[in-house]
Amino acid sequence: MGTSQLNAEGLRQSLEHLAQRHGIDQWDLGASCSDDTSVQVDRGEAKQMKAAQRSAITVRAWNTDGLVGITSTSDLSAEGLERALLGASEASAFGNPDDAPAFSPLATAALQPLEQPLHEPVNILQLLDTLKDAERELLGRHAAIGTVPYNGLAQRRSQRLYLNSAGAARQQAMTTASLYLYARAEQSGRKPRSAGAVRLAYGAGDLDIAGCIDEAAERTISHLDYAPITTGRYTCVFSPEAFLDLIGAFSSLFNARAVLDGVSLSTRESLGQQLASPCLNLHDNGLHPGNIGASSFDGEGTPTRRLTLLEGGVLRQFLHSEATARAFGVAPTGHAGMGAKVSVGPDYFEVGPAGSSAASGGAAGLDHSRHQGPLVLIDSLSALHAGVKASQGSFSLPFDGWLMDNGQRVSIEAATVAGDIRSVLNNLIGFEGAAKVTPDGVCPHVWVEGLSITGEA
Amino acid sequence: MGGFGSLWSGRLEALLASGRRAGADLVEVFLERTDHLGVLTEQDRVTSVSPAFGLGAGVRVFLGSRDGFVSTNDLSDQGLQSALEQALGMLGLQVASLSRAGGSDGFDGLPALRDHASSKVSWLAACPGLAEASSKLLEGTARLERHGRHLQVRRGSYSRDWQEVLVAASDGTFARDIRLHQSLGLNVLAADGDHRASLGRRYGTSDSPDDLRRWDADASALEICDSAATMLYADYVEAGQMPAVLANRFGGVIFHEACGHLLETTQVERGTTPFADKVGEPIAHEAVTAIDEGLSPGAFGSLSMDDEGMEPQRTVLIENGVLRRFLSDRAGEQRTGHARTGSGRRQSHGFAAASRMRNTYIAAGPHTPEQLIASVDRGLYCKSMGGGSVGPTGQFNFAVDEAFLIENGQLTRPVKGATLIGEAKEVMPRISMCANDLELAAGFCGSVSGSIFVTVGQPHIKVDSITVGGR
């Protein structure tokens, strides 16, 4: 990998100098750079080897009316920086007086320490050999697995910083690595089936490659024996990954920006109301050790922290930026991006029972493998970008999964699951098994009653 | 920033020669400058203005069927040389030492620049500025207020993407272009009690600085408000297998997703298309002829040259149901044998080019739209499609934003929440009727080489049977 690096002090001095020259009293800057290498393989051969050195800055400037403008660039030269600052200053004339961002009051508050070991990059040819071995191993798991059409092994070294004219200075450096294996299997006279697995770590040497191969193979093979499902209403069990995807797609429920914009199903008055089954707790916790690549501060420099969203199904707090927090009269929560209109988004969900007792944690002893009667086990959801209407609450999504019936498991040929997120949250029966740590959050299997399944039977 | 031009030829020749001497079969350099403006209006306010500009390079080295690709924001001689050396290293090659340097190893230098940009240098300056773009967009949200009922949210968005590219390769490719894409979106959220409907439309054109000025905000607002009023009180669709009539324009997204991607050589390389060995064979109903081209004036997916410096072609993919050609880029040609079609495209310098669609559509047929609807006893009319995707086994899915039931050959009540699912191999033979009202619509396509500007299109088409997901 290359050696891209941000010089925080140099950037600060340059911006201070430029701001003074152009009469700009208030500014802030977010910057990032990264060195990436990645490989893909195809049946034992290198398919693509890539590297990238990226750098980007975003500058905001406030004018004398307190309005903010923004400009972004990948040109970190002196000319680029000046053009960005002047562009932001020009854009500030179009700032929104009803919703002008300010510096976060927490931009200089202490950060929670994160355990993120930095790893030296591995030579790309070594990455290639590792991925070739993984592909070979996966192809050897079953005669029907003919290709692994989507695969990749990547590593990144990155740095980000936040500076503002009031003296805030945040910096974070990290290394991360990822592996994904998505296999395709086909048996004579049958349709092709596919499934995969992903692993993340702080370095390529720490990736759980064997676990990724095992999971990809097990999931792919389990879908070989498939049958169509009859359209109807079913009790559904969401895998941790599937439920986290669904919650993520409807995270505007918990997003103060979306509430203020009128596109959330929640309103200001929703705080304190029962939004979900009493057995559900939901937190956002970017600091969870399972959150590989966690940020210690958000786009406005606010420290990342754990936030209770639902407690016993009751909505407790929203995710906030500085501006939305000010509008609600609370402190920023560390979920902001950076912009003239600052976006807000979740970090890493923790889903689980509200308590350990049967009454507070939902139905006890749930076990899909021993359930009497039909049950749909939803392994993974697809096409969330197309099938979710977040502002309406509705979804209709293709999924991979199995029909469970008295302990028998048959893969479902092709089907969609449809419903309303409010009904899902209210018809949540309970949880099964221990919470699983995934790239998007922590969650056990989740049981939900009465969802519509459309099949081809 | 100065523009790219023939002044770069000396620097690029040195770089390409260096790569060839190291043993590469082919070296390609892609240089890019960008200038972006985004404006968001909500209700009657400008709520976000987001200018951005950038520059970068992508260096790709081929050796046999393998390639290495490195991107960087550093366009200095040292930055480009470092990128080249990294790409060579991926293939086990090293830049030759100075004592060995000298011979060009088959690289005879770059020819004169093929400059597609010379007539386009004034485009960026001719585009609407911040004030004009904001004002026009506010006109759009004001028209929504005038025409709509129960509108809780009114949004307008404008995006102007200007890009200058220079492609140089050791096979003698040396070409420059300037691209300009403008797109406009209007979105509403209508709410009345428990009833909610969110709808939007996006309009996009290329290569015309005046397009925003010519935009008919009133007509766009009327169209969206009519749809919102229709869908606000619609019931959820009943799921099942049924015939469907898909409207023209953005209805073409179904062909783009379900079939178009499977006709890219990237899918042949992966072994993920069921059509890999079907050239010359029927893969669709004989009513279907499908075309991909980069030539339609002003269309979102049109190009003067692709991102590998090749001029685009008109590629007939399917003719009367028979598969004729695949879309191919440089790597695709090398690895699959399908000749290049001017379809090598990428979002930016950060991606290696891949075979991608441009303006893709099903050709017009002999029927009227009314004849298609009249031929259905009970089915679904999909007036407006949302997004969709295709999976690694060829299974596709599309959200339908606006739909009506067809009962006894007539459109009856509106329904919402429909998703169309199926497999291209099974659905293409079921497109049994095409109407005579072909229209195109602008869109964005995300795939292996990033998000690119494309056009989808079709006339009204009838699918004899498709799975409709709903509640």
Image: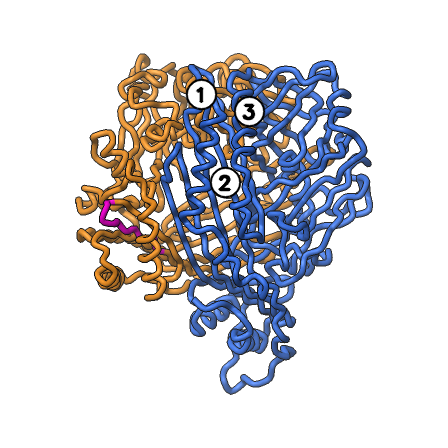
Chain colours: A orange, B blue
**Coordinates of residue A160 in the picture (x, y in percent):** 31, 53
Q: Is A64 colored magenta in this rendering? A: yes
Residue B123 visible in the snapshot: yes
Is label 1 or label 2 in front?
A: 1
Between A102 and A53, the residue placed more toward the observer is: A102
Q: CA distance from mark 1 to mark 2?
A: 45 Å
Residues at circles 1 and 2 in contact by the CB criterion of under 8 Å: no
Q: Badge 1, how many Cα within 10 Å: few under 14, some, many 20+?
A: some
Q: Chain of mark 1?
A: B
Q: Are marks 1 and 2 on the same chain?
A: no
Vertical side of A99 occupied by A71: above or below: below
| Quarter occupied by the N terminus of chain A | bottom left
Q: CA distance from mark 3 to mark 2?
A: 44 Å
Residue receiving disc 2: A197
The numbered mark at residue B286 is none
Left or right: residue A152 versus residue B262 is left
Q: Is A84 colored magenta in this rendering? A: no
Q: CA distance from mark 3 to mark 1?
A: 12 Å
Q: Badge 2, how many Cα within 10 Å: few under 14, some, many 20+?
A: many
Between A410 and B93, the residue placed more toward the observer is: B93
Vertical side of B315 occupied by A353: above or below: above
Is label 3 or label 2 in front?
A: 3
Residue receiving disc 3: B226
Vertical side of B183 occupied by A42: above or below: below
Task: Please report the bounds of the magenta region as a residue range.
Answer: A57-66
* Residue type (three-letter) at the residue carrying disc 3: Asp
Q: Are marks 3 and 2 on the same chain?
A: no
Residue at the location (52% across, 65% down)? B59
Q: Chain of mark 2?
A: A
**Coordinates of residue B54 in the picture (x, y in percent):** 43, 59
